[in-house]
Amino acid sequence: MSLFSKRAMPAPLRNSGFLIGNNWSGENVTEETALEVAAVLSCVSLLADSVAALPLRAITQTGDRNTRIETPTFLTFPAETVTQYELIHMVVSSLALHGNAYLFLDYAGGSASLPSQVVPLHPDNVNVNIIGNARNYTVAGSEIDANQILHLRWFTPPQAAKGISPLHQQRNTIGSALAVERHVSQWYGEGGTPSSVLEVDGDITVEAAKVLQATWETQHRRRRRPAVLSGGVKWKPISASAADMELNASREYAVAEIARIFRIPAHMIGAKSASQTYTNNEQAGLNFL
């Protein structure tokens, strides 16, 4: 039997385009938490900003020819609360984060074929229910006619009803970046590691230790005066440990990995690379364009 034989009936659509597995990072990866990672916010905003700034042209197809026409009003002025730039920006952001973008087409006051308004919907508020090979959409608990929903999908496996969500598929990578950032923030915000140590010979009282500490801070904090030490006092700085250096390397690795997820040239979001040169960056920028 031929692969494309009419007798070979396709399997029904699947409700999801991804498989839910373990999140080994232990972090809760959602849209809100993912955008707390600077690399994720940079990648998504770069994609959305770049696409939304492109000129928008409308065409009609006649046979094999495409003819440019006047841009319809529903694209020039999508809705009362959404501009054309914001509409495209929201669509690209939804695709980049959730793998799906949903637009509500309002035909009230419009023609039979063209909507009067186009309103973007948050993917978390839209459920796609599959009955046979048909898609039914529910928005905030209310069923909406499928003809009033424009469903755009990013990376989509065959016969999947929804596009793959990068937040789901790459939650280990994004979660690991979240874990590193949380550790660094807690280390600086709550850590008890001092910048230096004043050592003295023998034991001193708590009051004497406080006086010595206060005197040192008064004389040397935000100043670079020569230090005069007496009475066996020794000053020792605390330098970054090997673990701290490894942590910084992990942060750079996470940035490069996230740039790879969104297919963004790493230098465009400030990631460091051993092979980073002006020529390489220029070519990567042209490729991105």
Image (spheres, rainbow, N blue to C red):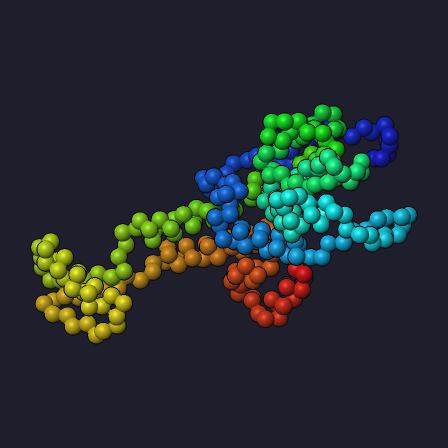
- Quarter holding the N terminus? top right
> In the picture, residue 194 is in which quadrant?
bottom left
The residue under the point 14% across, 66% down is: 233
Residue positioned most to the bottom: 226
Which of 174/31 is in front?
31
Whether residue 159 is visible to the viewer of this picture, yes or no, is no
The residue under the point 31% across, 49% down is: 190
Q: Is residue 11 above or below residue 165?
A: above
- Quarter holding the C terminus? bottom right
Which of 67/261 is in front?
67
Residue positioned most to the right: 63
Whether residue 102 is visible to the viewer of this picture, yes or no, is yes
Residue 215, position as x, y percentages in the image: 16, 64
Residue 42, position as x, y percentages in the image: 54, 54
The residue under the point 23% across, 73% down is: 225
Which of 31/118 is in front?
118
Residue 247, position as x, y percentages in the image: 41, 54
Q: Is residue 21 above or below residue 270?
A: above
Which of 69/207 is in front?
69
The residue under the point 57% across, 53% down is: 45
Left or right: residue 146 compared with residue 38: right
> In the picture, residue 224 is in which quadrant?
bottom left
Left or right: residue 3 compared with residue 189: right
